[in-house]
Image (cartoon, rainbow, N blue to C red):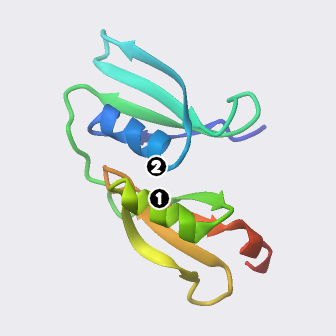
Amino acid sequence: MRLLHTMLRVGDLERSLAFYTEMLGMQLLRRKDYPGGRFTLAFVGYGSEQDQAVLELTHNWDTEAYTLGDAYGHIALGVDDIYATCSVITEKGGRVVREPGPMKHGATVIAFVEDPDGYKVELIQMSSRAKV
């Protein structure tokens, strides 16, 4: 077995695609409309679905926003330069909700950004990953 994808429901698919592709550097891997069900699925990631897990962005055509609830945590991405990554995200209009720095009870350098629907994405400095 292996993890295939994580699904997020998004209110504005184009806005979410711009965030994940332009700000986080993912690629749109595939997209398909389902008119009978009134939804669109878009899969984004850093490589082939055959090789790694990806994100499935589900847009229900008649829903503009969702209540996230308190069970969802975050998606985590490893980055080579967390400070430069946060700077680029901010310059492109993204929202950094926790500036880069060591985690509270450790030395791993992390930051959090928020996608257009309010989902948290944790950025982890890869050179400090072994210190977790």
The amino acid type, in three-letter code, at marker 2 is: Met
Query: Looking at the image, is 113 positioned above or below residue 102?
Result: above
Q: Position of residue 20 (x, y in %)?
A: 47, 43
Which residue is most to the bottom? 105
Residue ID at (55%, 65%): 84
Residue ID at (64%, 66%): 81
Q: Which mark is first along the chain, 1 or 2?
A: 2
The image quarter containing residue 50 is: top right
Element type at marker 2?
helix
Q: Is residue 9 visible?
A: no
Depth check: give the residue in front, 83 or 96: 83
Give the residue number, with chain letter if any, for mark 2: 23
Q: Are marks 2 and 1 in contact (CB under 8 Å)?
A: yes
Q: Position of residue 114 (x, y in %)?
A: 38, 59
The image quarter containing residue 17 is: top left
Query: Looking at the image, is 99 positioned above or below residue 88?
Result: below
Which label sits in the foreground, 2 or 1? Answer: 1
Residue ID at (38%, 59%): 91
How many numbered markers are drawn?
A: 2
Q: Position of residue 113 (x, y in %)?
A: 43, 63
Residue ID at (43%, 25%): 41
* Image quarter of the C terminus: bottom right
Query: Dot 1 surroundings within 10 Å: few (below 14), some, or many (20 or more)?
Result: some
Q: Position of residue 56 (x, y in %)?
A: 50, 34
* Image quarter of the N terminus: top right
Question: How much space separates mark 2 and mark 1, taking CA atoms?
Answer: 7 Å
The amino acid type, in three-letter code, at marker 1 is: Val
Depth check: give the residue in front, 26 or 8: 26
Residue 88, numbered label? 1
